[in-house]
């Protein structure tokens, strides 16, 4: 008896689907972009957005809290008065933390999205998932105008998380409600 | 061959089920409210894009290319996933897929798995199969959880509990979670958060579906809102992803089209809160064992039909459900399948692949052919044409039965307002829409189509008059 794999592939070939014409990419691959549009659209998801010129000064509200700091977070972000939690961290440690501070890989102005790729200052995916508060620092030059531009900048084989606002659901009468399993508060610092 | 669980065993034909649903005013109210909200929001999210049509065309073309090169692309996907430490399995049908997943759970000694909402696993009846094998599947998507705790069936692709309003959800949660909770959506969401938290932190195996799989990189993509997906895709040690063989895109670049089309079409957002992308296994981050189960379950048979195969372009956004006057009125459960609404009417009978099955054969008639579904479909599936084509197949398989003639006549009449209104004025409507669900005679112009008597009525209230009354 043929394996499932062989049988499925044979059935597909047997269907003799004619070749498709060349894909026409007539849509916009670029967009106006910019810090302002990004800030506006992140805020539309009820995330908290600030545009700042320096990171450390903006971190004062974290004082007195237990905040996860992934590997690669710049030394100057690790201000005094905050209990910084560094890897290795267990699931329980993460669950008990007050929040997490990260950078990002790319951001998208058109959709108000930040993308994490597990690189510098982002850490593995669990770090930004279990704490109930996520503070993400976005540099102006990391903001891509459009989805196509953002994908071009990303390395597809890294574990990626696209984040557009805090955790939400539309499952009750199709109305959006913020705050389910992911961080209930998302705060974005745009550094210009 | 075993029956395809894409339809629920013992479901009545669409007209019979719809007739019953029509009597449920609560259901109709819940649906009207929910679909009304989402329709308006989707329109706003789409109007914002001046290149929406170009995106739709590209979406259609990319998916057609996938169908044309499906064998090559699947082999390519298998190679790229394997190269990154994943294991690929192939399943001809639901039973084979369920067995693969059950065996994998047993290998991990798991008697419980957490699940991310997935149409593919719902289609193959995975939860029931796992349960029979001693493995309990916990649905973690809020709407799936509502359905699971309510011992209910899904009625919508995206929001399976769309037929439930907040007070019904509250009742289910209080009864099954043993907690006091108000009917405020935020409180209900909080109750789900608390209920599932420990499960996420301790369960070793997760099962997911996939929105897209990128053939050339092996990357799998899941879009979600709540973060339950991220929990399942990140915390467990083993991840099993079940996907239909048509869920491919050829390249990473192709995703730029679908990541724009899907969120706006389904939840009417510029972007859904969370999208996860992973490629095989990443050391030190997320599950260290990854299995990808590719299922056919009627898809290759669908591929053979030159008109019907476009149903395989579907990205499960549910926009066609939300605009459908028939769906809004009858609810999703009337379709007797996890795929309701316009897409269900064309996909389900093709996956079943047997036009002698009376329930599946009744589905292509669950439409007035108004065309709203085609207009909103982000991958431009010409649902009305496929419906007409499948109706012809039903007739070919079964001959012109009284039932098919009546349903076709009714559908034809609902299509044009003028036709319908004339029939109404002729005063024959009451007879046509007999209370007990039987047609005693068709009014003009339907009367021209048949002289046969006593065939099941498609519905109790005209779609048209209901539509006008409720939507005007
Ligand atoms: S058929 Fe089109 S509109 Fe309907 S769910 Fe599929 S992609 Fe969406």
Image (cartoon, grey):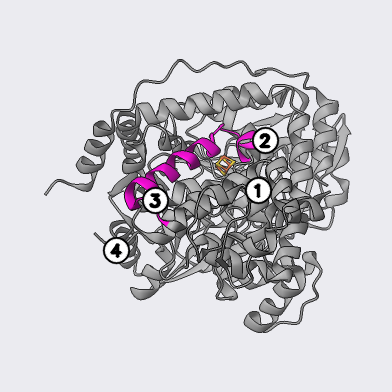
Q: Nearer the viewer, mark 4 or mark 2?
A: 4
Residue at which label 3 appears? B400
Q: Residues within 10 Å of mark 3 (few under 14, many from 20)?
A: few
Q: Secondary structure at mark 4?
A: helix
Q: Nearer the viewer, residue B181 or A165?
A: B181
Marks 1 & 2 on one chain: no
* Image position of A190 with respect to B102: above or below: above
Q: Which quadrant does ligand 1 occupy?
A: top right
Give the Cα distance between marks 3 and 4: 46 Å
Marks 3 & 4 on one chain: yes
Q: Which residue lies at the image location 63% right of the left edge and 50% below the top edge?
A: B444
Label 2 C-beta lies within 8 Å of the nearest ligand 1 atom: no
* Image position of A143 with respect to B312: above or below: above
Residue at which label 4 appears? B103
Residue at which label 1 appears? B324
Residue B396 is inside the magenta segment: yes
Lower position in the chain sequence, tag 4 or tag 1: 4
Answer whether labels 1 and 3 touch (C-beta < 8 Å).
no
Q: Nearer the viewer, residue B116 or B107?
A: B116
Q: Nearer the viewer, mark 4 or mark 1?
A: 1
């Amino acid at each position: 008896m043929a394996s499932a794999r062989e049988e499925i592939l044979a059935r597909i070939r047997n269907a003799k689907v004619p070749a498709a014409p060349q894909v026409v990419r007539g849509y916009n691959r670029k967009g106006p972009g910019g810090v302002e549009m990004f800030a506006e659209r992140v805020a539309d998801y009820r995330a908290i957005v600030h545009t700042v010129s320096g990171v450390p000064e903006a971190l004062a509200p974290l004082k007195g809290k237990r905040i996860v700091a992934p590997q690669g977070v710049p030394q100057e972000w690790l201000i005094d008065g905050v209990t910084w939690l560094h890897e290795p961290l267990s699931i329980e440690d993460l669950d008990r933390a007050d929040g997490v501070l990260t950078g990002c890989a790319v951001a998208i102005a058109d959709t108000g999205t930040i993308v994490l790729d597990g690189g510098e200052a982002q850490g593995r995916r669990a770090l930004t998932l279990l704490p109930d508060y996520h503070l993400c620092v976005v540099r102006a030059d990391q903001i891509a105008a459009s989805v196509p531009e953002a994908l071009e900048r990303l390395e597809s084989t890294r574990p990626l998380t696209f984040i557009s606002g805090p955790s939400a659901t539309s499952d009750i009468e199709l109305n959006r409600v913020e705050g389910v399993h992911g961080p209930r508060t998302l705060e974005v610092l745009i550094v210009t | 061959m075993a029956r395809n669980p894409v339809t629920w065993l013992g479901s009545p034909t669409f007209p019979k089920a719809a007739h019953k649903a029509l009597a449920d005013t609560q259901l109709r109210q819940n649906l009207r409210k929910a679909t009304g909200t989402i329709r308006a929001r989707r329109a706003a999210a789409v109007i914002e894009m001046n290149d929406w049509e170009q995106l739709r065309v590209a979406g259609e073309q990319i998916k057609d290319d996938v169908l044309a090169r499906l064998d090559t692309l699947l082999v390519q996907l298998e190679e790229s996933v394997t190269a990154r430490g994943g294991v690929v399995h192939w399943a001809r049908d639901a039973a084979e897929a369920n067995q693969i997943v059950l065996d994998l759970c047993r290998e991990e000694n798991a008697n419980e798995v957490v699940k991310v909402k997935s149409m593919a696993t719902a289609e193959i009846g995975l939860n029931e199969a796992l349960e029979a094998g001693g493995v309990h599947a916990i649905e973690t998507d809020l709407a799936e959880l509502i359905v699971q705790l309510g011992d209910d069936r899904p009625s919508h692709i995206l929001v399976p509990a769309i037929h439930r309003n907040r007070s019904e959800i509250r009742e289910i949660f209080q009864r099954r979670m043993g907690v006091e909770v108000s009917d405020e959506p935020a409180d209900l969401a909080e109750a789900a958060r608390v209920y599932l938290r420990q499960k996420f932190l301790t369960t070793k195996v997760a099962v997911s579906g996939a929105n897209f799989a990128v053939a050339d990189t092996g990357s799998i993509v899941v879009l979600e809102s709540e973060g339950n997906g991220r929990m399942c895709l990140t915390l467990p040690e083993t991840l099993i992803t079940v996907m239909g063989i048509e869920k491919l895109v050829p390249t990473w670049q192709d995703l730029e089209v679908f990541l724009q089309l899907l969120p706006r079409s389904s939840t009417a957002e510029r972007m859904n809160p969370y999208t996860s992308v992973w490629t095989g296994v990443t050391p030190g981050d997320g599950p260290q064992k990854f299995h990808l189960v590719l299922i056919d379950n009627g898809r290759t048979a669908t591929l053979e039909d030159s008109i019907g195969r476009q149903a395989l372009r579907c990205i499960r956004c549910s926009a066609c459900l939300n605009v459908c006057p028939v769906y809004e009125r009858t609810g999703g459960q009337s379709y007797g399948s996890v795929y309701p609404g316009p897409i269900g009417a064309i996909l389900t009978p093709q996956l079943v692949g047997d036009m002698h099955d009376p329930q599946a054969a009744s589905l292509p008639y669950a439409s007035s052919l108004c065309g709203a579904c085609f207009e909103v479909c982000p991958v431009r599936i010409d649902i009305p044409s496929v419906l007409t084509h499948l109706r012809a197949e039903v007739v070919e398989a079964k001959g012109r039965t009284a039932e098919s003639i009546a349903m076709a006549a009714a559908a034809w009449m609902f299509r044009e307002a003028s036709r319908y209104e004339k029939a109404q004025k002729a005063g024959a409507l009451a007879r046509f829409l007999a209370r007990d669900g039987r047609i005693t005679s068709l009014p003009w112009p339907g009367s021209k189509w048949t002289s046969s008597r006593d065939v099941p009525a498609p519905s109790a209230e005209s779609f048209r008059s209901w539509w006008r009354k409720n939507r005007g």
